Image: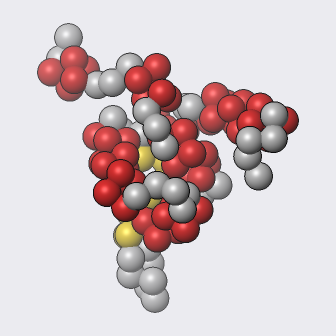
């Protein structure tokens, strides 16, 4: 087993870490800047959001990309590996909506 594989979090750890699923669900809709994520998740602190984004980037579930001019800012997008979780994230979103826990 390579060092990178041995340090990766399990899928269960990723999904159970607070704020990870909501962040990834937002990114299902397309690229989002830090400020967009913070606005859509007002209860998460900036420090926690930064940590979750770094963790997800380290796990190769999202990437930071530069937006084209005139924006010239960075945004976060799901990687192909993050996109592999689409069906799981959509199922969680649908169940949350059915139970009245999400908009």
In this rendering, position of residue 95 left or right of residue 12: right
Q: Residue furthest bottom?
A: 70
Name which quarter of the figure residue 89 lies in: top right
In this rendering, position of residue 77 left or right of residue 102: left
In this rendering, position of residue 81 left or right of residue 51: right
The location of residue 6, given as percent across then percent down, is 22, 17
The location of residue 53, given as percent across then percent down, is 37, 50
Q: Work out whether 31 lies above or below 56.
A: below
The location of residue 10, given as percent across then percent down, is 38, 19
In this view of the protein, can residue 79 be seen by the observer?
no
Q: Residue furthest left?
A: 3
Residue at 46% x, 88% y is 70
Q: Work out whether 4 lies above or below 103.
A: above
For the residue pair 103 and 10, the one nearer the viewer reads as: 103
Quadrant (top left/top right/bottom left/bottom right) for the N terminus: top left
Q: Work out whether 87 lies above or below 41.
A: above
Residue at 43% x, 33% y is 17
Residue at 72% x, 30% y is 91
The location of residue 62, given as percent across then percent down, is 42, 46
Q: Work out whether 36 lies above or below 93.
A: below
Residue at 52% x, 56% y is 43
Snapshot colouring: secondary structure
């Amino acid at each position: 087993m390579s060092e990178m594989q041995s340090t990766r979090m399990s899928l269960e750890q990723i999904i159970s870490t607070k704020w990870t699923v909501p962040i990834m669900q937002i990114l299902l809709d397309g690229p989002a800047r830090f400020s967009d994520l913070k606005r859509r998740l007002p209860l998460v602190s900036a420090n926690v959001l930064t940590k979750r984004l770094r963790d997800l980037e380290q796990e190769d579930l999202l990437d930071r990309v530069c937006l084209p001019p005139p924006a010239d800012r960075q945004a976060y997008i799901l990687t192909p590996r993050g996109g592999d979780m689409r069906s799981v994230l959509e199922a969680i979103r649908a169940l949350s909506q059915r139970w009245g826990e999400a908009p």
